Amino acid sequence: MRELAALEEKGTAWATWFRRYLLALYHLSEKGTGKVSDEEQRKALLLFDSILGYAELEEPPPEKSESGRGRPKATKGRNLLVRLREHKAAVLAFAFNEAVPFTNNQAERDLRPAKTKQKVAGAFRTFEGASIYARIFGFISTARKHQHSVFNELKNALDGNTFLNQACTS
């Protein structure tokens, strides 16, 4: 959505249409909590292809370099267009599968503490230290997502019984 918004600001019509298309699918999928009907899925796939077909006409093809060597340089819009075509199933997964969220905001929020620690410390001293850090913060993040008390769950984990063990056995 960020890349589409940036292209929209530059006046790219196909980006406007594609962003509206994704938002319409978002609303059809009950704001990302459900999945669209089979008929709507069929229509969505056709519309996806037609918008990107129009985009092919609007986006200039990659330019050859003056020396004729190396890969031709493509615009940001062309690169996004190629990625959308290659990852069509992943782009539309939120509308076709109710378990897939519309955005990756939660995943980005989960990574932020590790990236901040990495920036402050420069790097982890050992791979084992990084692995332990990731495991602890993964546990904390999962406890929060399940709306459990982080303190109580850490205490239970040290006692050997966690909500994760309880979920696996039930």
Image (spheres, helix red, strand yellow):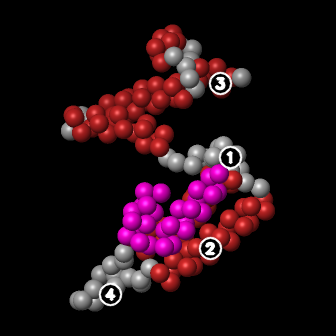
Q: Earlier in the sequence, mark 3 or mark 4?
A: 4
**Residue 114's spot in the image, x, y percent?**
34, 36
Q: Which amino acid lies under the numbered mark 3 shown in the image of this protein?
A: Ala
Q: CA distance from mark 2 to mark 1?
A: 23 Å
Give the crowd class for mark 2: few <14, some 14-19, many >=20 residues within 10 Å: few
Q: CA distance from mark 4 to mark 1?
A: 45 Å
Mark in the foreground, 4 or 2: 2
Residue 64: assigned label? 4
Give the crowd class for mark 4: few <14, some 14-19, many >=20 residues within 10 Å: few
Q: Which residues are magenta?
A: 1-27
Q: Which amino acid lies under the numbered mark 4 shown in the image of this protein?
A: Lys
| Residue closest to the eye, 164 or 107 | 107
* Element assignment for label 4: loop
| Residue closest to the eye, 113 or 47 | 47
Does residue 10 belong to the magenta stretch? yes
Mark in the foreground, 3 or 1: 1
Callouts 3 and 1 close, C-beta under 8 Å: no
Q: Which residue is mark 3?
A: 167
Q: Which residue is mark 1?
A: 30
Main SS of the magenta part reads helix
**Residue 122's spot in the image, x, y percent?**
21, 38
Q: Earlier in the sequence, mark 2 or mark 1?
A: 1
Callouts 3 and 2 close, C-beta under 8 Å: no
